[in-house]
Image: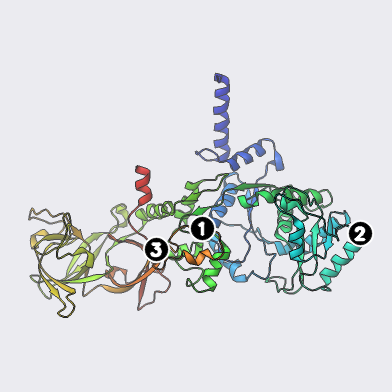
Amino acid sequence: MTSNTEEGNKKKLEEEKREMNNNSSPANFIENIIIEDLKSNMNDGKVHTRFPPEPNGYLHIGHAKSICLNFGIAQEFKGLCNLRFDDTNPSKEEVEYVESIKEDVRWLGFDWDDRMFYASDYFEKLYQYALQLIKAGKAYVDDLSAEEIREYRGTLTEPGKNSPYRDRSIEENLDLFKRMRSGEFPDGSRVLRAKIDMASPNMNLRDPVLYRIMRATHHRTGDKWCIYPMYDYAHPISDALEGITHSICTLEFEDHRPLYNWIIDSLIDEVTDFKSRPQQIEFARLNLTNTVMSKRKLRELVEEGYVEGWDDPRMPTISGLRRRGYTPEAIRDFCERIGVAKSNSIVDIALLEHCIREDLNAKAPRVMAVLRPLKVVIENYPEDQVEELEAENNPENSSMGSRKIPFCREIYIEQEDFMENPPKKFFRLTPGKEVRLKHAYIIKCERVIKDENTGEIIELRCTYDPQTKSGEDTSGKKVKGTLHWVSAHHALKAEVRLYDHLFIEESSEGESETKMVLNPNSLEKLTSFVEPSLKNASIGNSYQFLRNGYFCVDPDSTDNKLVFNRIVGLRDTWAKIKKG
């Protein structure tokens, strides 16, 4: 049994954790590690993290989790967070990606102040440190081809075998490595490898490659270098040079941690400009249903024309979500809700959609838009009369006030809001039945006009009851249906883009599988009508289209053409699941 003293000590410890976190919620396992480090005065009581993307594509929602975690931890513990571009592979890196990453981090609400770095900042130092490893007998130049290196590496059940070039002298290795830098050898002909243990059960310690020959123009250093460091070599050194205390990364790097530590430990006693002895901590990456979280596969979708660019609103990129109408507050809330775990799992995309609904519910003005219009003529309404009706902008937020909407004899309603032969419990418009028009009057369907050739319904003829004006109703009538509408003579024509999940189901990791699960109905474009109050809507503005969902003004909009993206529908499956 637990004593009262032990129980009291546990409670006291939890209180200390919450106080140090400046957070009322329980600490996650990374925060617990940092709390213990601070208690033992490790790193002189400092907390310094970094967000280290490779600029080879646009960031996606998974990176948003890492951004929120790294910058968020720095904020919680009054520390610092760097933005560093791990630009060690010039064949795939571009300035466009650098600029997009900076924009995404800022948009999410974080700032690196003056702490923006590049791995290329350290190319000369990385080269000099490699010379030190060679002099210490911890690295050698290997002439094996990439295929031969794989063969010599062994398998998960069989140890590797030493390269025939592993026992070259220090002098020969130094000479060859310097000549690699000077450009004497062709691409792929030689590499620099760490000399660790070809029999190690960890494949990453079987003499990993540290440098390769690659003639590619770098976006910052041009053609100065023809050898480039590998990520696993450059990353821990960059951390140590920048004074990073906690190098937080995703679980796929867990098996790389011994190599991370080996590189730091092999140099730390010889290098004078290391500012810290960083520790690597791994957490579970974000996996979303109906979503591919691979920059390589997303790049394939862009380059092969399956989407219209990195910011296509169907893409899980941060720029795509921004264009679609997601808010930084919703994404940060989502990252907070999913938490930080040690094991991988898949998060239902419905939770992300719930977060944006919850955020926009209090922010977004309510307006009326008819996506698939059906014309209605109110025969007993005066032909030349136009009324200005009062409509609240957001019933969830009275401070947003109200607006005037025009009402006249001819209006549009949704096609789906009328049925000639309805089933039971259809409470919308049908022949001989009454419904209320939102903010307006009760109308009754008298006649249905059809196309003589196709039989398609093209118009409804209705009557209205003047005593049923919204807010002034003296009729005593009760109707079950309320429809949204727009004035046919005042409404603005708009292109409305209805987005669905880009993938029908969870994508597998097979390279050819990405295209197989693409949803052919992920985009539908409609010619619709919106109320005239949206005439001056700005790009990025979000609205709730009554009964249709949340929509945002797309950058394709012009002075003569409004374009709206559906952010998310009104139905909230996640909230229903949680209530259940």
Residue at the image position 43 percent from the left and 72 percent from the top: 555
Residue at the image position 70 percent from the left and 59 percent from the top: 231
First in residue order: circle 2 vs circle 1: 1
First in residue order: circle 2 vs circle 3: 2
Q: Secondary structure at mark 3?
A: loop
The CA span between labels 1 and 3 is 17 Å
Residue type, mark 2 in image: Ser
Residue type, mark 3 in image: Asp
Q: Quadrant of residue 59?
A: bottom right
Could you say where residue 500 lies in the image, as x and y percent from the top left?
39, 63
First in residue order: circle 1 vs circle 3: 1
Q: Quadrant of the C terminus?
A: top left
Could you say where residue 439 lies in the image, as x and y percent from the top left?
19, 60
Residue at the image position 86 percent from the left and 70 percent from the top: 179
Q: Quadrant of the N terminus?
A: top right
User: Label 3 neighbourhood size at 10 Å, few (<14), some (14-19), many (20+)?
Assistant: some
Q: Label 3, on which residue?
A: 500
Apparent side of residue 358 relative to residue 219 in the rendered image (left or right): left
Q: Nearer the viewer, residue 323 or 426?
A: 426
User: Label 1 neighbourhood size at 10 Å, few (<14), some (14-19), many (20+)?
Assistant: many
Mark carried by residue 61: 1
- Front tag of 2 and 1: 2
Q: Secondary structure at mark 2?
A: loop
Could you say where residue 472 lies in the image, as x and y percent from the top left?
13, 57
Could you say where residue 266 lies in the image, as x and y percent from the top left?
81, 50
The CA span between labels 2 and 3 is 61 Å
Q: Label 2, on which residue?
A: 169
Residue type, mark 1 in image: Ile
Q: Nearer the viewer, residue 82 or 453?
A: 453
